[in-house]
Image (cartoon, grey):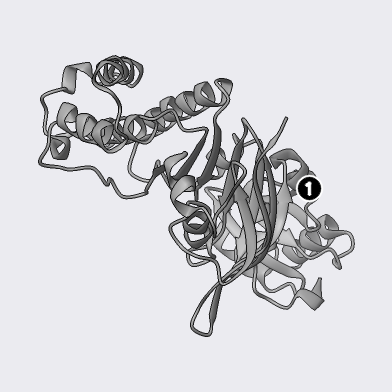
């Protein structure tokens, strides 16, 4: 298996602000690779550089064997890019939008008709052919945007938070479409805030303040969380939350109904016993147990901004 994207020290500055800071990547072909991180962490800036839309301040990158500095136009011709915001024309019909995109990619007339028919069938757009794109639902717009992004059969597809405006069923259907593309040899890079989507990726990179702070397969990342994750089940949830948050080596407490998900620094020995003792001292009846880390726990651990030395 070859490598679709390679970067070495890739950096982008905007004045004194470093948006992407010396990023090294090696992303294999025919895989889905996810970027995660807080808002402003550099995900979109990194994607724009890899698309040849933004010139790096420092470092190098090859996309499909093309240098993004020396060959940005060639990079753009060989990739597909789907933005978070619907970027086609609201006042054109589905057919008119697809025809316009086909003209941009200079598809010959015979091939264009066949390709448009394939895409309408593939993304279930036939019944909306004469409908204005602006009147489509979120899921329908998403399918139309994906059809447009894959018009020229790109070997590499960039998706910037593509499912932010659709319901769970449409998100599932969308990911089924992505895996079908991967089966045909397409490499997909996706930025997302949804942890369930991130878990579907073959590989992930977490960014924080422009730096890659963790990278690997989802299971590997979850298995290697340094913090201890403790679950507290109680009917006295508010009092339990206050008692747990007062512990010096607890850095995150998330409420899930009648449960608390507590993340403790590695320096807290016997985390379950420590949390249980604190609750008993506050006369709170609770069940306390260690649980496996989730991707959300990985996100919280690697992007937290409290004192690292405390860990």
Q: Secondary structure at mark 1?
A: strand
- Residue 140 placement, left or right of 160: left
> 100 or 222, which is in the foreground?
100
Image side of residue 147 versus residue 182, left or right = left
Q: Is residue 60 above or below residue 32?
A: below
Q: How many marks?
A: 1
Q: Is residue 282 left or right of residue 20?
A: right
Percent x, y for residue 98?
Answer: 23, 30
Residue nearest the observer in this picture, 240 or 160: 160
Q: Nearer the viewer, residue 243 or 2?
A: 2
Q: Residue at x 10, y 41 (%)?
A: 91
In the drawing, does residue 25 fall left or right of residue 160? right
From this viewpoint, is residue 240 visible? no
Q: Quadrant of residue 117?
A: top left
Whether 109 is drawn above or below 84: the answer is: above
Residue 147 in sight from this viewpoint: yes
Q: Residue at x 54, y 65 (%)?
A: 41
Q: Pinpoint residue 219: horizontal percent, then vertical percent.
A: 73, 39
Residue 129 lies in what quarter of the image? top left
Residue farthest to the right, as pictured: 269
- Callout 1 crowding tier (Cα within 10 Å): few <14, some 14–19, many ≥20: some
Depth check, front residue: 120 or 241: 120
Quadrant for the N terminus in the image: top right
Q: Quadrant of the C terminus?
A: bottom right
| Residue 17 in picture, x, y percent from top left | 53, 80
> Residue 217 in the image: x percent, y percent?
72, 41
Q: Residue at x 85, y 58 (%)?
A: 273
Mark 1 sits on what residue? 290
On screen, 182 above or below 14?
Answer: above
Q: Residue at x 27, y 47 (%)?
A: 87
């Amino acid at each position: 298996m070859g490598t679709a994207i390679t970067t070495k020290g890739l950096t982008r500055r905007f004045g004194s602000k470093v948006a992407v800071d010396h990023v090294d990547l090696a992303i294999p072909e025919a895989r889905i690779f996810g970027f995660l991180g807080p808002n402003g962490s550099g995900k979109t800036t990194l994607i724009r550089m890899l698309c040849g839309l933004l010139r790096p301040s420092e470092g190098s990158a090859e996309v499909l064997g093309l240098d993004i500095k020396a060959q940005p136009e060639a990079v753009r011709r060989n990739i597909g890019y789907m933005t978070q915001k619907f970027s086609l024309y609201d006042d054109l019909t589905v057919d008119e939008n697809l025809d316009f995109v086909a003209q941009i990619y200079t598809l010959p007339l015979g091939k264009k008709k066949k390709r448009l028919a394939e895409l309408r069938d593939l993304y279930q757009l036939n019944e909306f052919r004469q409908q204005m794109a602006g009147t489509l639902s979120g899921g329908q717009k998403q399918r139309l945007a994906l059809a447009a992004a894959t018009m020229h059969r790109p070997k590499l597809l960039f998706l910037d938070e593509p499912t932010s405006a659709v319901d769970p069923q449409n998100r599932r259907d969308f990911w089924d479409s992505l895996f079908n593309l991967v089966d045909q040899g397409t490499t997909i890079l996706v930025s997302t805030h949804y942890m369930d989507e991130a878990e579907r990726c073959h590989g992930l990179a977490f960014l924080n303040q422009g730096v890659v702070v963790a990278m690997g397969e989802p299971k590997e990342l979850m298995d290697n969380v340094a913090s201890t994750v403790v679950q507290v089940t109680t009917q006295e949830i508010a009092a339990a939350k206050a008692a747990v948050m007062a512990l010096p080596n607890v850095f995150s407490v998330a409420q899930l109904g009648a449960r608390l998900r507590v993340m403790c620094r590695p320096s807290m020995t016997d985390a379950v016993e420590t949390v249980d003792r604190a609750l008993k001292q506050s006369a709170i009846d609770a069940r306390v147990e260690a649980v496996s880390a989730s991707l959300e726990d990985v996100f919280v651990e690697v992007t937290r901004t409290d004192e690292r030395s405390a860990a």
